[in-house]
Amino acid sequence: VSLLKAAKQVVCLDLTDFRPVCSPGSLVENIGNYQFNGIKALKLDVKIGQCLTQLGIERLATRLPNLTVLWIGGSGQMEGQILDPLFKILSEQLEEIFLNDAFVLRLVGHLRLPKLRVLRLHEWGSDLGADLRNPMITDAPLQVLALHSFPFTQEHKSA
């Protein structure tokens, strides 16, 4: 945290695979009331056994007043519910969201993001149509919808 406070030119905070030496609780305490005004993009993982806590995510979100880009990695299926407060806190400012799994969209799709211009989904299933009818998508000024996925079958070429 002290490094982030000193490095005021940082515009992207990447906490993917973040495994702090200190506990998430003490990390939250160390952040305190400091505002990270320069950070515009945040990358998080949501995985089983992840060190991030709901309280930690809420505290971090309230300290990023200029955040406009959010990347969420991991499947989110087991621990994705901790993201709801993050999206609620950032709902008025998010312009770009990158989700590894559409499951996260199912958890937060009821929220309205009035500035959302870009949504990128990496993995999605057959119920994508229902996901795209959520208020997060239908009420947003969306300009870019990027859908990516791994093919169901891959042909292996022999050397």
Image: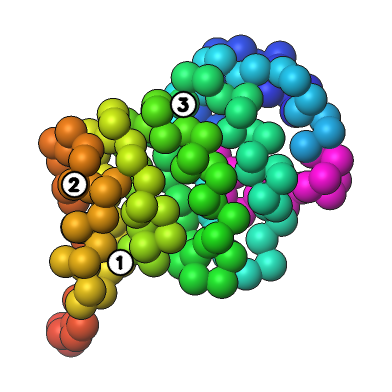
Residue 24 magenta = yes
Task: Say what secondary structure mark 2 lies in.
Answer: helix
The vertical placement of 36 against 83, above or below, is above
Asked whether, in this view, residue 37 is left or right of residue 18, the answer is left
- The first of marks 1 and 3 along the sequence is 3
| Residue corresponding to mark 3 | 67
The vertical placement of 118 against 19, above or below, is above
| Residue corresponding to mark 1 | 123
Q: Nearer the observer, disc 1 or disc 2?
A: 2
Q: Which mark is residue 138?
A: 2
Q: Amino acid at mark 2?
A: Thr
Q: Nearer the viewer, residue 51 or 4?
A: 51
Q: Nearer the observer, disc 2 or disc 3?
A: 2
Q: Amino acid at mark 1?
A: Glu
Image quadrant in which the N terminus is located: top right
- Which residue is located at x 59 percent, y 55 percent? 82
Residue 22 locus on image (x, y percent):
85, 46
- Which residue is located at x 68 percent, y 23 percent? 4
Q: Quadrant of residue 150?
A: bottom left
